[in-house]
Amino acid sequence: MKKTIILSLVLGLGIMLSGCSEKKEPAGEEKEVTLHVVVEDKVNGKELVNKDITQTGQINTLYDFLEKCEELDVVFKDGSYGAYIDEMSGLKQDFNKGPWWLYESDNNETCKESGMCPAVEELKIQDGDSFKFLYTKDM
């Protein structure tokens, strides 16, 4: 009888503690994502990058990819619509008068469906997507 009471107390305490424990959200899936990246400086007529770049980690959006990509040396700023590319490959934009950083994709599903690419933090990407980043004074 004594063993039954002790076992019941231990099980009850275990159930209570497990119910009170903090539940953790599962971490995002680690994956490898390769994008074909073209970076063009239209102001000076130079192609700076034209190759496949691979990043590994919890990558779901273009922001996630670019944030990890030291090779492109991207600096983000926060704007009223979220983060935007302020600088890439040493070229800083002048938000008020240009040149600006623009980007496009001919095979990303979201960009194709919308007719334009949304903000970097919202743009879901897939392995094999292609992006062209343009440093330009033309809008």
Image (cartoon, rainbow, N blue to C red):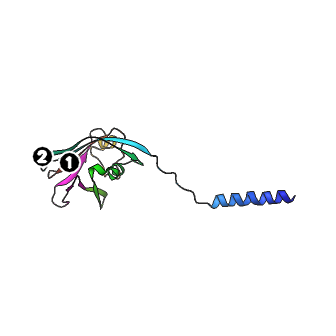
Q: Quadrant of the N terminus?
A: bottom right
Residue designated by label 2: 45
Q: Residue 104: which numbered mark, if any?
A: none
Indicate the secondary structure of the residue bearing disc 1: strand
Residue at 27%, 46% (x, y): give it.
Answer: 116
Q: Nearer the viewer, mark 1 or mark 2?
A: 2
Locate residue 15, reporting x and y percent.
69, 57
Mark 1 nearby-residue class (10 Å; few <14, some 14–19, many ≥20): many
- Nearest the camera: 70 or 1? 70
Any magenta on residue 95?
A: yes
Residue at 66%, 61% (x, y): give it.
Answer: 17
Residue furthest out toward the left:
44
Locate residue 92, reporting x and y percent.
20, 57
Going by the image, does 17 lie left or right of 4?
left
Indicate the secondary structure of the residue bearing disc 2: loop
The tag earlier along the polypeptide, 1 or 2, is 2
In the rendered structure, which amino acid carries the disc numbered 2? Gly
Task: Give yes or no for contact between labels 1 and 2 (Cβ–Cβ under 8 Å).
Answer: no
Residue designated by label 1: 134
User: Could you tell me how many numbered marks the image carries?
Assistant: 2
Any magenta on residue 102?
A: yes
* Residue 22 lies in quadrant: bottom right
Locate residue 46, reporting x and y percent.
14, 45
Mark 2 nearby-residue class (10 Å; few <14, some 14–19, many ≥20): few
CA–CA distance between discs 1 and 2? 11 Å
* Residue 125 lies in quadrant: top left
Residue furthest out toward the right:
1
Locate residue 106, reporting x and y percent.
26, 39
Q: What stretch is highlighted in magenta?
A: 87-106
In the rendered structure, which amino acid carries the disc numbered 1? Leu
